[in-house]
Amino acid sequence: MRKALGRGIEALLPAAPPKSAPVVQVPAAPAVVGEGREVRRIPIDSVRPNRAQPRKNFDPERLSELAQTIKEHGLTQPIVVSYDSISNSYELIAGERRLRASKLAGLKTIEALVRTPQNDKDRLVLALIENIQRDDLNAIDTALAYRKLMTESAVTQSELAHIVGKSKSAVSNTLRLLELPDEMQKAVQFERLSEGHARALLMVSDPLERSKLFKLVTENQLSVRDAEKIAQRIEGGEKLPEPSEKGPKVKPPKPADIRAFEQALEKAFGTRVEIKTKKDLKSGRIVIHFFSLDDFDNIIKSIKK
């Protein structure tokens, strides 16, 4: 079933490497992925972000782990880009996580498959399919991408199901997750709540009882099966007790400017960097991670520059 995902998109998004695109010549012959798909090595700084990227959140720790893997073993899957002849640069279509990790690893060039999407709809379709094929997108970001494609490109649920290679009911169930309150959606996006737990919450029609169950699940790490059983009891008339005010608190996402500073430092040092601030955001500490003695030496050299 996985292999059939997105069948028919080839005609929509043909591979067409541009003649004038910036390319880095390498001694080895270019790798080939499938019929007529030439993978080219391009300058990593010539790739700009995808306007239609469905993935919204990137875990810095996992990015750092991926960067270390890329340092040791190289990139196993090329990114997908389109070429803009006006700016003489590339726009990322799929593979932002790999691109970020490659920059973090200090790569100057990256392998890329150049495609020619005609519009933002094509870019979103390809990015969505690529992420789903790699199981690389959480359920809420998938649902948001579905909705964006339907509203902006007038795609029906049936057409969407055909595009992504899923049943109409599967698409419908994914879209239903957007009925959850924002707090619960963010818990799925930041992997504090699984898709199965989210579906269990949808079983509860009363907003108050749903909120109680959400706190019960996150504070006690209940299994999906246990969450479903409790949801069924709630719908049968049972009321949950008020949650304890002393339960563990979920840390809010870091401010955008702090994350921007972290990313700048990570790029400079080529490793994971954490900025941990106090509540007033006026003081704190910077933690620079290293995963080998070579990493440590590189960090020291960067600091001494």
Image (tube, rainbow, N blue to C red):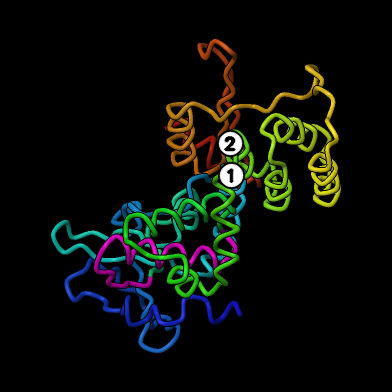
Queried whether the magenta region covers residue 236, the answer comes back as no
Q: Is residue 106 visible?
A: no
- Horizontal side, residue 187 vs residue 71: left or right: right
Residue in the image at 52% along x and 44% along y: 57
Circle 1 sits on which residue?
189
Frontmost residue, 186 versus 67: 186
* Label 2, label 1: how far apart the Cα atoms are: 13 Å
Tell me if mark 2 has few (under 14), some (14-19) or many (20+) residues whose alpha carbon lies within 10 angstroms of its own: few
Residue in the image at 52% along x and 54% along y: 143
Q: Nearer the viewer, mark 2 or mark 1?
A: 2
Residue in the image at 74% along x and 32% along y: 209
- Give the magenta-colored segment's residue range: 113-136
Expressed as whole percent of the image width and height from the top left, the position of residue 185 reads 59, 41
Expressed as whole percent of the image width and height from the top left, the position of residue 120 reads 29, 60
Frontmost residue, 21 versus 53: 53
SS category of the residue bearing label 1 = helix
- Which quadrant of the figure has residue 29? bottom left
- Which quadrant of the figure has residue 80? bottom left
